[in-house]
Amino acid sequence: MTHLHPRGVNHLALSTTDMKHQLEFWCGALGLPLKALYWMHGVKGAYHGFVELAPDSYVAFVQHPANGGEVEFGVSHADGPGGEIRGGTMQHVAFHVDTLDQVLEMRDRLRSHGVQVLGPLDHGFIQSIYFEGPEGLNLEICCGANIDERAWIDPEVTQLCGITPEELEFLKHPEPFARPDEAVAQPTAPRPDNVRAQRNARHAGLMAHSDVFVWENFSETTPPVVVGR
């Protein structure tokens, strides 16, 4: 039995219509080094870019040739870090630094690049600044300690979400998983709330491939530039 679960974000992929503008902002205003920029694997005409947060954590961008459309606040984008938006989309994303002094240093760096910044604000378990990135992205930089669930799980909100006491205990203490000797078979039907799988035949066909087929046919490991030893 193991309590294995994802330990962090390897990369957060954001859609863009202007790769250069995004990279200028994230590398210039935020100071994150560019680590990769190449044709996206398996997607004709699409670019993939990565900037580094930490040695194993990145923000990525996907510029697809069919990307387009205007920013529509309340639908495609939230109008600020507390604004409404349709379900299943990113409301805002927060990046971590170690100290409040570093939060303030990032505030001043951003302002020196002409970016308006709100904050800092103290939320109890984190202290944050808020600002807007290119194409209407809602962004946050914060510092803080690990969240104490005893203090920050509100019984009133829990009840409003329809979560019973028994369900709450499960959510707080997920069961460990015992991996079987054989790989778990792909489910034969999508989950009821997986809208894309219900409507998109291409996605259903993609998910029908075996794990071996996917590994052997979809993997692309050769970088675009040969680096001398």
Image: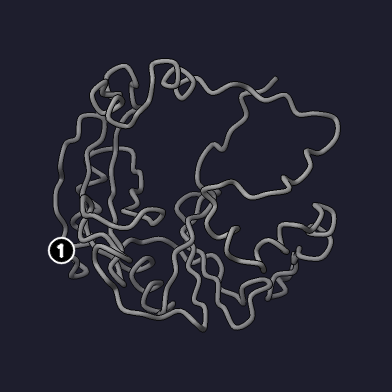
Please indicate whether residue 130 sits to the left or right of residue 158 in the image: left
Q: Quadrant of the N terminus?
A: top right
Q: Quadrant of the C terminus?
A: bottom right
Specify the quadrant of the image occupied by residue 100.
top left
Q: Nearer the viewer, residue 46 or 229?
A: 46
- Total number of numbered labels? 1
Amino acid type of the residue that numbered disc 1 sits on in the rendered structure: Gln
Q: Is residue 106 above or below residue 110?
A: above
Please indicate whether residue 48 sits to the left or right of residue 152 in the image: right
Circle 1 Cα neighbour tier, 10 Å, few/some/many (<14 / 14–19 / ≥20): some
Q: Residue at x 26, y 23 (%)?
A: 154
Q: Is residue 180 above or below residue 8?
A: above
Residue 121, position in %: x, y? 15, 42
Q: Residue at x 18, y 57 (%)?
A: 108
Please indicate whether residue 56 sits to the left or right of residue 140 in the image: right
- Residue that numbered label 1 is attached to: 116
Residue 191, position in %: x, y? 59, 46
Q: Nearer the viewer, residue 11 or 169?
A: 169
Residue 90, position in %: x, y? 37, 55
Q: Dot 1 lies on which element?
A: loop
Q: Is residue 138 above or below residue 168?
A: below
Residue 148, position in %: x, y? 33, 21
Q: Residue at x 55, y 47 (%)?
A: 192
Q: Residue at x 33, y 48 (%)?
A: 94
Give the color scheme: rainbow, by chain, secondary structure or one colour.
Answer: one colour
Specify the quadrant of the image occupied by residue 83.
bottom left
